[in-house]
Amino acid sequence: MRYRWLNILFAAITLSVHAKDLITIGFVHHGPPIDIMQDDTLVGGIVFDIGTTIAHKAGFIAAFQLLPTKRAEVWLAENKIHMLCLYNRHWLEKPERFIWGPDLTHYQEYFILNKEAPDIKSYEQLQGMTIAARLGYYYSPQLEDLFKKEYSVRLNRQDTDSLYRLLTLKRVDALIDNTWSYYYRQKNNPNFTLRLASLRDANYPVTCLCSEQSSEISKTLVQSMNNLLNQGKIRQLMAKYLSPKLHN
């Protein structure tokens, strides 16, 4: 039934707009609030909000393509998609082959603990701990060094819900995640029993990047990003995903 519904939706879109008006934005599934899925379709979240806003400002209609983590960069390089959002240059193997927009917001990663656990203020305290981390992600040099030397154990999961489930069930000592996901869960779960540690692992500027092969479309999209940023629209859009302490 859901595939029939998706086909009907896709047919309606293609009948109402010309192909030149559509751009495809790739994304990797992480879970709310970065991406909110319904029946295998992206219907909300930060990637959806930012992507559709940029596309609309540029005069396009956004379509979203779910991709495996390791295929996202390849698909953009091969021009199979037009844009990726919420990325930092250091996360890609060859960032120089893309057209990058301005820094749109910041992605902060903290260690997260059960409420009764002692606070973590230094990397030395992580030695001997098992830490839930996202599959395929690179963290700070200090944390990566702990994993490499096996001073800390890394337990990988792809989706955000699985990371939090491991910590809630006390199968790990801590998890590392972004503040967007943390505050989303804190806000939407009345029985939330986790807290941020004092130690922040990273604070990355993030933006959207575009295909070099579709240079005219990419330039239009980057101009759209600059306009939205200068008008304060990105800040307004992101406000609902941030703790009041993180609005600056």
Image: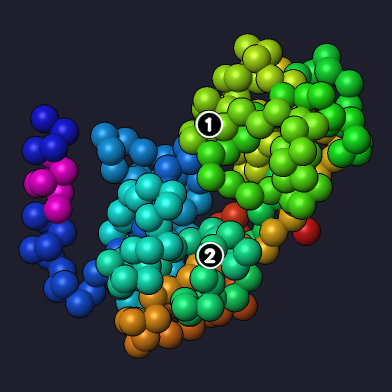
Residue 188, compared with residue 105, is above or below; it is above
- Please report the residue visible at 16 percent of the width from the left and 33 percent of the height from the top: 2
What type of secondary structure mainly makes up the magenta span? helix
- Please report the residue visible at 11 percent of the width from the left and 55 percent of the height from the top: 12
In-image side of 52 versus 115 (left or right): left
**Label 2 belongs to which residue?**
93
Amino acid type, residue under disc 2 in the picture: Glu
Residue 245 colored in magenta in the image: no
In-image side of 213 versus 144 (left or right): left
Residue furthest top as drawn: 169
In-image side of 241 versus 219 (left or right): right
- Residue 58 or 157: which is nearer the viewer? 157
Q: Which residues are magenta?
A: 5-10
Residue 106, compared with residue 33, is above or below; it is below
Measuring from the top left, give residue 77's x and y in whole percent.
37, 71
Q: Which mark is residue 109?
A: none
Q: Nearer the viewer, mark 2 or mark 1?
A: 2
SS at mark 2? loop
Earlier-in-chain disc, 2 versus 1: 2
Q: Quadrant of residue 6?
A: top left
